[in-house]
Amino acid sequence: MANPAGVHEAPTSHSLSPPGSPLHRSASGLTLTNPPPVRWESYPESLSAVNYNPVESNIKRHARRLAKEMSSGRLLVGDEKQADVDSITVRYSQDGEKCDQIEYAEHDSVEGVESMLEGATAASTSTFITITPNGSFGYLPVCREALLKILSYLAVFPGFLEILYTFGQKIWEENENFGIYRQHCHLPAPDADGEDVGAPEPFFEVCYNLKYVTKTESNMPTEKFRFATRKTGVWMKYYPSSQRSVWMNVHPSDEFWEQLEDLVQADSASATRRSDLDIHLLQLSCADESWAEYINHLEQENHLLKLKTCISSSAPSRAPSANLQKSSALDDAQRLARQRSKLLELYNFLGMNEYIIASMSAGFAEFRRLSAASAASAAKLAGDKEFEMFEAALQRHGMRTAQHRDRVMTLLRVCESLATLVPSMLVSHDNNLMRGLQEKAAEYTRSMKTITVVTMVYLPPTFAAGLFGVEFIQGKSLSQFKYRLMVFLLLLSALMAVTIGSWRWYESRTRKADGELADLEAAGDKRNGNGGGVRGAGGAGAGGMGELAAKICPPPLVRSYGSTEQTQTQK
């Protein structure tokens, strides 16, 4: 994070106040008296002073889960004294209306974190703390002591631990597909004199997680930018009596931190204080910033997949390229499956953001109602007009998120419709492959027929030559030679005539049988077309087939059945 002021806080001795510290009033305003020491090692059991709902926030259950996550070694870095925490502390005037000072700090040790926490407990301040892991599945860059001191000194309610558990080292995505929204409102009732003497300071606490999209330059030649989804966790605690608010962001987007610095600088230049409701809207705006561009990119991908799938399904296939085209069809099926999985995930993520916005609207409305009914007049996060503007902005964010979700659903349906073409594409390519194999088989058959004819022509001369090569047929005189030659030629002619005639007779008989079968099938189709009935056509067809079978291969026994008697003819 940028550090314009160049401030790095050094370790100091200090006394931090835990939740539930008593208050007293003086001429200078609210101050804390005799703050008890914070038992950071026993967090979250150290929050016993706060009256949390035991059903929603079971302290013992959270303590067991936190000890398990700490001992697993996947959540935090291993260094016992390491910390990588950035902070912005904004100090306001005594009435809490004007910005007096801004401090930027980067804390790389436990002592630096303690110094930051001391400033966060001062009245009329707004402290923004950020913890940025190396990616959504990276370790939180703080050691156990630093994290527990942050959680205990700021009295972070246990609901925020559920968001922390979604970070840390992971082999696959788990605990990712649900939204978390928790809030707690503590507005103690005043005593009979209208004073909150001895009562814990009232506060309003809220935490939630959001999904946002990052856009980075790609090194791949096929794409210029790469998009990725990230998660962020937000925690805020507001003390209306002391005009103090504390924020903690885990893995915020770069856009949020830059715009937050711009807002703080603008408030410092105008000497005004921005409402904490605006910071919540800034969180939602930065989370929504790149969703539209990412969905536009997905629409382009879907369009390319659609064109490629339709071309692949309609393109003719030939035998030499059938295997390649089938491989292309399988690649298209895999791309469609990956695209469908990505769209389902994004649809779920947008549903999470939509849930957070709806929960935030209901939760802040509840706090507004409770603060209005409370006798503590100072327990107000904002005025009525600011709340109305905040509610209208939440509605706009909710409608925009719902629109993004509808667009993703449309892309998902298009992807599913394209997926239905994949089986037909595979079947078509298989049919084309079989047709190509049949063409190859027909070509091989023609080649074998040529070889057979040539062999048939040369077979009689070979036989005759072998026959006349026998010793008892050979003679020595010229008359004997002429006689043998005449016999050889006559025998050769007879053998060739018998061979060729037999082959022609077999071919003509086979061709005639095929023609009769085709005529019978055509006659049956004609009868069916003229409405002759299935039974009549079937009977004629059966009779024709039997007659053809009798002509081609006459059986030794043929039975003919009449209507009243059975006759038998032996052939």
Image: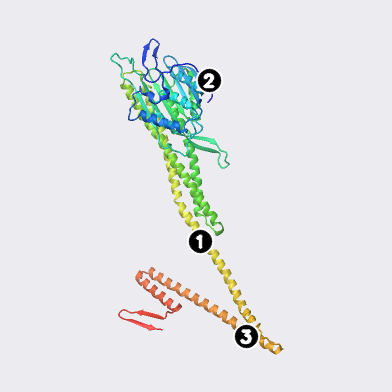
Q: Where the C terminus falls, by quadrant? A: bottom left
Q: Which residue is mark 3?
A: 490
How much space separates mark 1 and mark 2, taking CA atoms?
75 Å
Q: Which residue is mark 2?
A: 8
Query: Would you call the spot at circle 1 few (<14 residues within 10 Å), some (14-19), or many (20 or more)?
Result: some
Q: Which residue is mark 1?
A: 434
Q: Earlier in the sequence, mark 3 or mark 1?
A: 1
Image height of 343 relative to 289, above or below: below
Q: Amino acid at mark 1?
A: Met
Mark 3 in CB contact with mark 1 (< 8 angstroms): no
Spot occupied by residue 394 in the image (x, y as percentages of width and height): 39, 30
Q: How is the image coloured?
A: rainbow
Mark 3 in CB contact with mark 2 (< 8 angstroms): no
Residue closer to the observer: 522 or 324:
324
Q: Earlier in the sequence, mark 1 or mark 2?
A: 2
Q: Is residue 288 visible?
A: no
Query: Would you call the spot at circle 2 few (<14 residues within 10 Å), some (14-19), or many (20 or more)?
Result: some
Q: Secondary structure beneath disc 3?
A: helix
Q: Amino acid at mark 3?
A: Leu
Residue closer to the observer: 150 or 446:
150
Image height of 348 relative to 553, above or below: above
